[in-house]
Image (tube, helix red, strand yellow):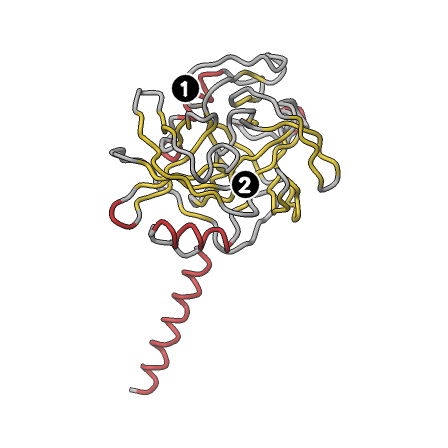
Amino acid sequence: MKTTGVLVSVCLVVVPMMAHGIVWRNDIPESTVLSYGNSTRLQGVGRIATGGTGTFLGIGSGGQAWGISAKHVITTGQTSTFNFEDGGSYAITQTIGFAGVDISIFKIAGWNRNVFTPTLKMDGIFTLGTEFDSAGYGGHGPEGGGGGGWGFDNKRRGMQTRLQNVQDNFVFAGEAQKMLIDRFDSPASGQARAVEGFGAPGDSGSMLLDNSGQIWGVLSGGQFEQYGNLNWYAAITPGIANQIYSLTGIEAVPEPGTMVLAGLGVAALARRRMKRS
């Protein structure tokens, strides 16, 4: 579930509510968000039976498959199932929730899907305006069309958004942490993306996936699903990314900038060797 509330400065006043789904800009058809939810990069997004969304993260040590979600969706000591709209269902056999942040990872038993594998944001640089994809399951509807009484089914819907703000020491569930904020932009604002959407209760744990395939955060909570309102995502900081890669054995992929610097270093070394020969 996504918890809803009022954003006051950097503090969160939470009013828990139970519901589900992606809400989208009201000038595009539902078929657009359904199609976007089935795009290649979003096919590893599944529904966690405890009440939220998760994403396949990769294969780690011993061939073990892992996923990522929000800690308030599923956490240490809990098991569940990881489900897909085609009927695929996989047991979640172990969950690890991280202290001080609304992020968890989970083991997936019997994983047999060939889907896009994301990487984790590792450099700690969160640039405002960065564009993201996301997806979720459950209740749904166009902005203003449901009044909060969204429809329910078992289909994955996709959306686009962008980073509006970053807040350090954002208090969520009693823990001060870094949160990434997005805003539900109206088509009339000139800021809305083509498949502009907004995570709703039940989309908790859904990822912010940038254009290079990196997960920047997972959905924790937010305001009511209407234009101008905000959602907040628990940020993948370098410390959390390193913990996840260490615990899972999934191979970390260097940031693009790091790879460029490494390449420059190799080139410089080669030039020095050439000068010496």
Residue flagged by tag 1: what amino acid is it?
Answer: Lys
User: Label 1 crowding class (10 Å Cα cut-off): few <14, some 14-19, many 20+?
Assistant: many
Front in this rendered view, residue 227 or 194: 227
In the image, residue 277 above or below residue 177 = below
Residue farthest to the right, as pictured: 9
Contact (Cβ within 8 Å) of mark 2 with mark 1: no
Tell me the quarter of the image containing the C terminus.
bottom left
Which of the numbered marks, if any, corresponds to residue 102?
Answer: 2
Front in this rendered view, residue 55 or 130: 55
In terms of secondary structure, where does tag 2 sit? loop
Residue 30 image point, x, y percent: 48, 16
Front in this rendered view, residue 227 or 63: 63
Which residue carries the number 1 mark?
A: 155
Sequence-first disc among 2 and 1 = 2
Residue farthest to the bottom, as pictured: 276
Residue flagged by tag 2: what amino acid is it?
Answer: Asp
Residue 274 image point, x, y percent: 32, 81
Residue 113 image point, x, y percent: 27, 33
Residue farthest to the front, as pictured: 77
In terms of secondary structure, where does tag 1 sit? loop
Q: Is residue 277 left or right of residue 193?
A: left
Q: Residue at x 38, y 54 (%)?
A: 253
Gap in angstroms between the C-alphas marked 2 and 1 = 25 Å
Q: Residue at x 64, y 25 (%)?
A: 186
User: Label 2 crowding class (10 Å Cα cut-off): few <14, some 14-19, many 20+?
Assistant: many
**Which image quadrant is residue 181 in?**
top right
In the image, residue 77 above or below residue 194 = below
Residue 268 image point, x, y percent: 39, 75
Q: Residue at x 44, y 65 (%)?
A: 261
